[in-house]
Image (cartoon, coloured by chain):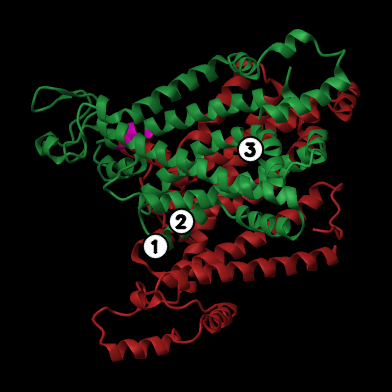
Chain colours: A red, B green
Amino acid sequence: MLVYMIRRLTQSLLVMAVMALIVFIGVFAIGNPVDMMISPDATQAEMQAAIARLGLDKPLWEQFFVFLGNLVRGDLGTSFVHNEPAMRLILDRFPATMELALFAMLIAVFVGIPLGIIAGLRSDSAAGRGIMVGSIFGFSLPNFWQGLMLIMLFAVVLGWLPAGGRGETVDLWGVPVSFLTWDGLTHLLLPAINIALYKTALVIRLARAGTREVMMMDYVKFARAKGLRPRRVILVHMLKNILIPVVTVLGLELGNVIAFAVVTETVFAWPGMGKLLIDSIVNLDRPVIVAYLMLTVFVFILINFIVDLAYSMIDPRVRLTETRA
Amino acid sequence: MSEATDLRDTAAIDIAVDTAPVAARAEPPAVRFWREFRQSPSAVVALALFVLIALAAIFAPWITPQDPYDLRQLNILDGRLPPMSQAMDGSTYWLGTDDQGRDMLSAIIYGLRISLGIGAMSTLIAILIGGSLGLIAAFYGGRLETLIMRVVDLQLSFPAILVALILLAVLGRGVDKVLIALIIVQWAYYARTIRGQALVERRKEYIEAARCLALSDRRILFRHLLPNCLPPVIVIGTVQVANAIALEATLSFLGVGVPITEPSLGLLISNGYSYMLSGDYWISFFPGLALLVAIVAINIVGDQLRDVLNPRLRR
């Protein structure tokens, strides 16, 4: 176990380094940093001074090591627009995005798994077919348009929920969250549903496939033959095995949710880091883009790592020993 | 294609000559394919719908009531009219107009043209690039394979939208840039799929037979191995066209995709966004509906293709 973890951590560091290199090449080398960081009105002398100050006259590999060194210290430069350290700017927005993502995942799990099990147990009934057709739409609806339609329906026509923003927040262990106030909760609901619809469709498919597979297993037949109530067979015996693929995929999807939150946050004006990224791309605020990228890569690697560990706990057949990767 | 299939069939006949009924063998693959595809009515409807949409997109200049980008045909006094309203010149705007008095129906059909074009073209080029790399990786193996597949793994561990956003942040806006971003986002799927399939096919007897005939590597790769690796690629490719269209729409909506001079459906929806809160739903609603219908149709066809082309599900 320990050997495995060390091996994985080394691999992760390698991926981080590769990503840092790609980001560096993409953002620093392809575009010309001078054009973006120095005012076009500057004189030749001012420009030279600025280039020297930013270290842009050094060879590229040396710039890369400077970038790496700063990266390790968490220093990714200062935002051109907000005039604040880029990393702090992102970290300020991080809780809002995480809250949205986790809330959406909860909806997906608690709606998707029961529906998927129903669709699996009664695959030929009207309910089962209806759920599957619904899941096709869940997959196909363009996320941003679906968000607009949710706003249209619930905010403009019905007027039940606010159209955007985050609402009132309270501090929970120093982190501002909105799900503890009524105002915050109403603001959270629509964007969370918008993210959750696709994930729910995914969970339904996984749970349905899992149910159909597990249904035929001998141990389920045995549990039934033993005279256990169907409820217990489904909720105890079957659910555990249905959960294995769901947990794996959902864990990996958490990263996707964070990335896709870019769209939902833009539609609902949710003050998370996705909206910050889009604003920064529009404003060509390079340090913030880089900081967002590196943080997202880090979160991704962390999530993959946790999913692997969680997987081994749910499914004892998986041994996290030294396997040649 | 035929040569490779023949060789495989000869091998199959040796083993299963008495079990295979002669009549079933005589049916050409295309006919069998269509007979099985037809079994799902919804898939046939979806296919018909998709063909209709594609035809409308291709023949847009001849069938739309107005050219939405010829400013002389627009009348600003017709701006933001709801669906079914009368134009100043007496004709009807079936789906309403946008803020500049542009007929939404025409704008949507022109938008479909750009969306479908980008979706199909990027998928095609991505299949070519990803497919070749996957095939090469499987056929030659060794360091080359490790290198290609590590890059694939690395890329697939990040969501498509993130990769595309970053690329466009670096490249800037434009149809060509969106195309490049979509190709880079997609190629890895095909590389992985084709490699997986090719690794299985490579060990089969018809490849061995082709090698015994001392055919060149290139000939074996493209005439024998490639055709037999295609079915899963066709399935993934179909669904990926839908994904590419959705991704392009999303990027354009976010303001990093196509420029305003070449508005895709995503950009049309984005334009309507600002008017939606005042109740002018149609500017965003109808382009989105067109997008949804196109994507659902492609996905249903893709689902059925998967069932028909998957040998494990063959009845």
Question: Real-space Cα distance between discs 2 and 1?
Answer: 9 Å
Image x and y of residue B49, in percent: 44, 21
Question: Real-space Cα distance between discs 2 and 3?
Answer: 26 Å
Q: Nearer the observer, disc 3 or disc 1?
A: 1
Q: Is disc 2 placed on a helix, strand or loop?
A: helix
Q: Is residue B114 magenta?
A: no
Residue placed under numbered mark 3 in the picture: A203
Residue placed under numbered mark 2 in the picture: B165
Please name the residue shown 30% across and 41% down the image. Answer: B268
Image x and y of residue A249, in percent: 67, 45
Predominant SS of the magenta segment: helix
Residue A161 visible, this angle: yes
Q: Is disc 1 placed on a helix, strand or loop?
A: helix
Q: Amino acid at mark 2?
A: Leu
Residue A180 visible, this angle: no
Relative placement, left or right, of A118 versus B282 is right
Callout 2 touching callout 1 (CB < 8 Å): yes
* A87 in relation to B110, above or below: below
* Residue bounds of the magenta highlight: B284-288
